[in-house]
Image: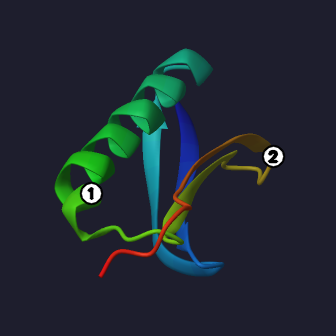
Amino acid sequence: MQSFRFQLRCRGELRHSMTCDCSDHHEAWKHALAACSDMLRDSGAHFKPGDGWMLEVKTSAGEHCWRLAFSTSGVELN
């Protein structure tokens, strides 16, 4: 098992950080995709144009694996 650090950032601020043990990079990637899917489903109704977040995944040694980002843009909602 390898440890991976998952860090959620909103507007540049660290909002949540957790470590997850995964069998390999492939499992960590699937975990990251599932986490992003959950965040969109659970908080998508609260997004407005200009909002977004970024999930960074690193190894326990601090090596960068992936950065998954969601951002919105467009006409302001009234």
Disc 1 marks which amino acid?
Answer: Gly
The spot of residue 51 in percent (x, y) is: 49, 71
Where disc 2 sits, the SS reads loop
Location of residue 23 with respect to 59 vertically, above or below: above
Location of residue 13 with respect to 28 vertically, above or below: below
Please state if 3 lies on the left or on the right of 34 as rendered.
Answer: right
Measure the C-alpha gap from mark 1 to mark 2: 30 Å
Quadrant, the C terminus: bottom left
Total number of numbered discs in the rendering: 2
Q: Which is nearer the eye, 26 or 9?
A: 9
Q: Which is nearer the eye, 59 or 54?
A: 54
**Residue, x 61% and y 22% (percent of image)?**
25
Mark 2, residues whose alpha carbon is within 10 Å: few (<14), some, or many (≥20)? few
Disc 2 marks which amino acid?
Answer: Glu
Q: Which residue is mark 2?
A: 63
Q: Which residue is mark 1?
A: 44
The spot of residue 41 in percent (x, y) is: 21, 47
The answer to which image quadrant residue 71 occupies is: bottom right
**Residue, x 56% and y 78% (percent of image)?**
14
Location of residue 65 with respect to 15 vertically, above or below: above
